[in-house]
Amino acid sequence: MKIVTKSIGSGGAGTNKFINEEIVKRFSNDKLNKLRDASLIEISSPILISTDSFTIYPEFFPGGDIGKLSVFGTCNDIAVSGGIPEYLSFSLVLPDGYDWNKLEKILDSTKKAADLVGVEIVTGDTKVVDGITTPIINTTGIGKLRKDLNDYSNIKLGDKVIITSDIARHSVSILLTRGDLGFEGDIESDCCNLYDVIKGLDYDKVSFCRDATRGGVAAVLNEITSKIKFGFYLHESKIPISDNVKYFCEMIGMNPLQMANEGVAVLIVDSDYANDAVNIIRESENGRKAEIVGEVINENMVLLKTEVGGERVVDIPVGELLPRIC
Amino acid sequence: MKIVTKSIGSGGAGTNKFINEEIVKRFSNDKLNKLRDASLIEISSPILISTDSFTIYPEFFPGGDIGKLSVFGTCNDIAVSGGIPEYLSFSLVLPDGYDWNKLEKILDSTKKAADLVGVEIVTGDTKVVDGITTPIINTTGIGKLRKDLNDYSNIKLGDKVIITSDIARHSVSILLTRGDLGFEGDIESDCCNLYDVIKGLDYDKVSFCRDATRGGVAAVLNEITSKIKFGFYLHESKIPISDNVKYFCEMIGMNPLQMANEGVAVLIVDSDYANDAVNIIRESENGRKAEIVGEVINENMVLLKTEVGGERVVDIPVGELLPRIC
């Protein structure tokens, strides 16, 4: 079995060979191929920049792997902030002795994801260390701003809340893959390119957008509530969730609204645009299950009208969140 | 002893507390403080971008630590490419159970280094994992281009080669700190802000610049030689090196020209500007030992005139380079 050795990360001939044969050949573009210490790019201001180090365990899971996640995760942060992802840095920290075939699978899926978003990987780095058993990947993305979708002051009374896909699949997929709970299943992570889901919208009619990663939809809405005077009223019956995910969450006693997603955005839009917005989102591959789930109200809290007709407050997750989920 | 726990990296209340009390308070600026998923910045194109994941072991060493290194290392890549470092992303991967005091020391020295360069840390991420014993830090830097100093075609016959400081100190410092060789000593790493060293130069008279990190001065000059038809003639007697570093390298049988630096640039400048350039560099705190060490010749190799009067070829390092030196 071919394995990763320290030589590919130590800056000598082994590193050059790895960069040429695995990185440049795969991610080829005119900026990366020059192999400069710093790559030259053109982009017009204002610019959005976001970084993330991905430590997900296990590194392969139904619906994705750490390579795909490291591209979509960072590009989604650019997209939901109102930008068009354009360039990405890609930095690998690999376990000494790591399976070369797994590394190639990760690099292939990184490339595929970058192509789907339309970003160029323009600069990178590789290190090899002891101690870890799965790769750690950092990506930093930069993109051009279309319209700022993270300005809390744009949120107004009566705006509608849209969730772009069924929730909690990423968390449940990882939990099942780890097998710690004694359950089996093949629920796929929702890990996807959110720019494709929202790009068709009229941004002038979108008040706010954020992806519901760690802490889920509950964390997003409660964070917003902490910054504005309004709150949210959600209708449980409208919240998109698959039957098997819902069943799994009930079994383990977790609230799906608090669970991490990797391909679900929460949008707050003009009330008279909400139906059009949902229809546009549903045309995208990963937005088919989009729903209008609630509205902005004049009370500073997140309220849920339950399916049985009661009302309860949706809190932020308390205690320990699932570690190494992204 | 206060230690790092998984909660500061898992996205919940512990993460928010850490970001507010340790990150925002320390690195405060109007972009970072907004705590957006993607920060908004302004910068005019063309832009230089560079990324590096720092895995140095040990994380504290004479003359620096991983925090300082992670700022200077990436900013130096921007600087020697001809840019002005402006913004930095900062992503921490911390060992579960890591000493909180050490973490604060690293964050303090990160802040100090960023202020010295004049870069703003505008976005970041924190994860906590098992397995590693020292932090891994990724920084991605972006800067405005002053003049492209990585264009090989600008190098011309007769240009002079300048080394901005005495060589091999970073490698020797790390080797001594690790103690693997049974020697002791307190040689300080040269880890420094290279933009401060070169910024006073007239870039129109500089043909090329690169920092001599892994593989040392030998790797830089041999890489250039592989891209152009010319070569280099170096005078060993002119190469700046401290007596104790030179002595240590002789003892362990390593060529100081092949050893890593973290604050030494190799500059190729117009021959009639070389004296002025050295004088300007020497005015900076970390350029006081700058020397003109050789010139561009019409032979495609790197030749060294030795102190005893012979001539030998300077090769790139062969075999395993020292791992986890940066």
Image (cartoon, coloured by chain):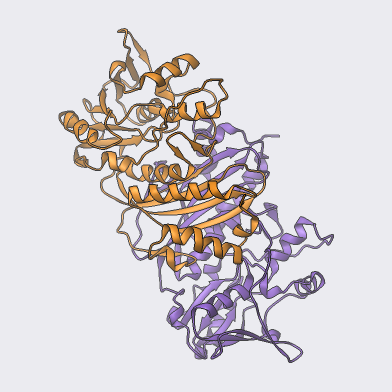
Chain colours: A purple, B orange
Residue A302 position (above or below residue A46): below
Q: In which quarter of the image is residue A61?
A: bottom right
What percent of the width, then of the height, locates residue A298?
Answer: 54, 91
Q: In which quarter of the image is residue B314?
A: top left
Residue B3 position (above or below residue B134): below
Is residue A27 at least partly visible in the picture? no
What percent of the width, then of the height, locates residue B294?
Answer: 26, 22
Q: Farthest residue to the right: give it.
A: A182
What percent of the width, then of the height, locates residue A206?
Answer: 47, 81
In this image, B117 relative to A73: left or right? left
Q: Farthest residue to the front: give it.
A: B1
What percent of the width, then of the height, locates residue A238?
Answer: 67, 85
Front residue of A276/A302: it is A302
Q: Farthest residue to the left: give it.
A: B272
In this image, B160 relative to A281: left or right? left
Front residue of A198/B173: it is B173
Residue A181 position (above or below residue B201): below
In this image, A253 relative to B220: left or right? right
Residue at the spot 33% in from the left edge and 48% down from the top edge = B117
Residue at the spot 49% in from the left edge and 60% down from the top edge = A118
Residue at the spot 46% in from the left edge and 78% down from the top edge = A152
Is residue A147 at least partly visible in the picture? yes
Q: Quadrant of residue A241?
A: bottom right
* Mark count: 0
Residue at the spot 53% in from the left edge and 57% down from the top edge = B125
Front residue of B281/A209: it is B281
